[in-house]
Image (cartoon, rainbow, N blue to C red):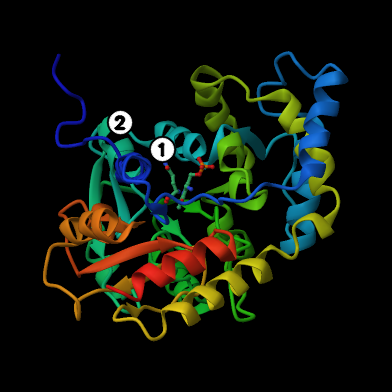
Amino acid sequence: IQSKLPGVSTTIFSVMSKLATEYNAINLSQGFPDYACDPKLIELVNKAMKDGFNQYAPMPGSNLLKENIAEKVEKLYQVKYNPDTEITVTAGGTQAIFTALATIINHGDEVIIFEPAYDSYAPTIKLLGGIVKTYELAPPDYGIDWEMVKKLFTANTRMIILNSPQNPTGSILSTDDMQALIKLINGTDILILSDEVYEHLIYDGQKHESVMLYPELRERSFIVASFGKLLHATGWKLGYCLAPEKLTAEFRKVHQFNVFSVNSAMQQAIATYIKEPDNYTGIGNFFQQKRDYFRTLLADSRFKLLPCNGSYFQCASYSKISDESDKNFSIRLLKEFGVATIPVSAFYQKGTDHKIIRFCFAKENSTLALAAEKLRNV
Ligand code: PMP
Ligand code: GLN
């Protein structure tokens, strides 16, 4: 058959995690915690199953979960989303992204993305017949010059994908970024897909600039969230999409034939769990401590640590160590030193190589210590 995605191979996450297992390396590559999620949560899932939540959930998501998401969002951001018409529970952030793009993108539509970018955006856009317009961010700050973004606009620009806090760079958008974006799209009908799966993972007292805080952005945005990050349970693949009623109505038309509905017992359990803010408000601090611990451990290594303002990823330059490509370097690091990482060039379609690798620090402190011991020998 003719490939619909020529040039795309197995994702770097699968490749590196598989190699990590094969070589028995410490896996700081794919982003997932190596510790257990809250046992209370597991009990709640058991209870939901015993209580009979074992058949299809309603297509847009469990009513209770949607209500409790609305309550949580309002508490955190003082913005109201209507659970009946503006919130859809999805199979993780990934399906929310796919569905939002499928809802909007027609053949020839252009979507602006900021690279290095999470690896599902570009292939999904292409699969739908869209055209990817790339703005390449550069280390160490990965900041955006919005005047340059404007240069990418054409009559076919349909959407901009934002991701703050950003995977893989750990950079975040500021109030100034949001104001510049508002100015830029004023008078256009460009939509926004705002991937906010790391909304809680933001550090040093900084505030998460959700697009929902800006009415001019909110009215044209799909916001993507993931319970995998919030609950330290990435394998549950549950998340949601917030969007104004008109966008949600179209989103659900696609969602119903894409997945129809997602795991009902887990939705019930999560609904109860997130009702209690104590179950999630400490998560930013929890990861900030991990970030600080990992950075301290690597302070006297030959890696140069880049800023990390959010997400559970720490990027580092190895240019003082080697001039190998980042792919070769990360494979050698894995095989010779026993630590798996992600080469950041994998997040650029052109493979731009700034000699930077990404570490995931959502790990037990003992795992981080062990990895750092090896990394200090590099
Ligand atoms: N967006 C970003 C930026 C991510 O890092 C991830 C993966 N962790 C996702 C979306 C997908 O989230 P999920 O695992 O809930 O599908
Ligand atoms: N988001 C995770 C990461 O960036 C992994 C997602 C995946 O494996 N598809 O590492």
Relative to residue 117, is residue 3 depicted above or below? above
Q: Are marks 2 and 1 in contact (CB under 8 Å)?
A: yes
Crowd class of label 2 (few under 14; some 14 to 19; many from 20; radius 10 Å)? some
Residue that extends furthest to the bottom in the rendered view of this protein:
300
Relative to residue 307, is residue 64 depicted above or below? above
Q: How many marks?
A: 2
* Image x and y of residue 7, in percent: 15, 37
* Image x and y of residue 280, in percent: 75, 57
Viewer-side residue, 17 vs 267 = 17
Q: Which mark is residue 266?
A: none
* Residue located at (38% from left, 86% from top): 300
Q: Is residue 187 left or right of residue 124?
A: right
Relative to residue 99, is residue 261 depicted above or below? above
Q: State which tag comes first along the sequence, 2 or 1.
A: 1
Viewer-side residue, 13 vs 252 = 13
Residue 109: quarter of image:
top left
Residue topped by disc 1: 101
Label 2 and label 1: CA atoms lie apart by 8 Å
* Residue located at (28% from left, 31% from top): 127
- Tell me if residue 237 can be seen: no
Residue topped by disc 2: 128
Q: Secondary structure at mark 2?
A: loop
- Tell me if residue 160 can be seen: yes
Q: Amino acid at mark 1?
A: Leu
Quadrant, the C terminus: bottom left
* Image x and y of residue 66, in percent: 75, 38
